[in-house]
Amino acid sequence: MNNLTEKLAFSVPITRDWYQLAESFSREQHEPDKAQDVYLNTLAVYAVNFYLQCLEVETDLPASDSSNPALRSLMNVSELMVKDWGKLECRPVLPGDKICDIPPESRQERVGYVVVEINQPSNQAKLLGFAKTAVEGSLEISKIQSLEQLINQLPEPLPELESNVVKLLEWLKGNFEVGWQSVSDLLSPKLRPAFRNTEDQQERAKLIDLFDLGLELAGNPVVLIITIRKIDK
């Protein structure tokens, strides 16, 4: 009999602003391979930053090594500074990759690693999971931990924000935080994804204020949909 384990993943659409910023950073590089690294690193960092902001975790992009032009050129860094915690490495992979390589400069002074699949044809960045360490210089993607482990590692919220912490595994028990609604409450029938809530999977939606996240999307409202399911291990 297989043991069931909950493994969270998170997909976010790659915005035009992120693409433009990644392209701008990549043009600073002289070698094509280096330019591609910087391009993918930038998309991965901004996807993780978006995810943490959705969880109301404070980050500091300007203080991150990945925002420093000199460090971007000298090293292969895709690090995001999380306030009151430390440097979280956001490593990009492509669809179909089995291994996530961790460069030597990113194996020290990191509080953890998030593996992000960059799928440009579908304009999606998918946070695949989390690892606390990467001492061997690579991560086997199929064996990395769930994003739930990242949530457990994040710094404790301030008392006034505790009610806003999203405890995703509680969703499987039918316990949902204030503000998270059923998809049918926020989307018209034509826009609803095909999904059925069961004891092994739950889905909730929340209206996102892009202005608070520093993003613009032609004035259109954005609904964040998170799906959590149990999978066989």
Image: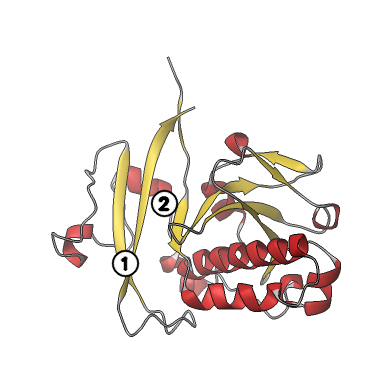
Q: Which residue appears at 15% of the width and 64% of the height?
A: 188
Residue 61, label in figure: none
From this view, report whether residue 228 is shown above or below residue 210: above
The image position of residue 80, as x and y in percent, is 67, 67
Which part of the image, by quadrant, shows the N terminus? top left
The image position of residue 81, as x and y in percent, is 69, 70
Write down the residue under mark 2: 168
Picture quarter containing residue 199?
Answer: top left
Residue 206, label in figure: 1
From this view, report whether residue 38 is shown above or below residue 150: below
Q: How many dots with numbers? A: 2
Cα distance between the residues tagged 1 and 2: 13 Å
| Mark before the other along the chain sequence, 1 or 2 | 2
Neighbourhood count class around disc 1 (C-alpha, 10 Å): few under 14, some 14–19, many 20 upward: some
On the picture, is 143 further left or further right than 138?
left
Q: Secondary structure at mark 2?
A: helix
Q: Nearer the viewer, residue 168 or 224?
A: 224
Q: Nearer the viewer, residue 83 or 99?
A: 99
On the picture, is 177 further left or further right than 109?
left
The image position of residue 141, as x and y in percent, is 61, 39
| Protein image colouring | secondary structure
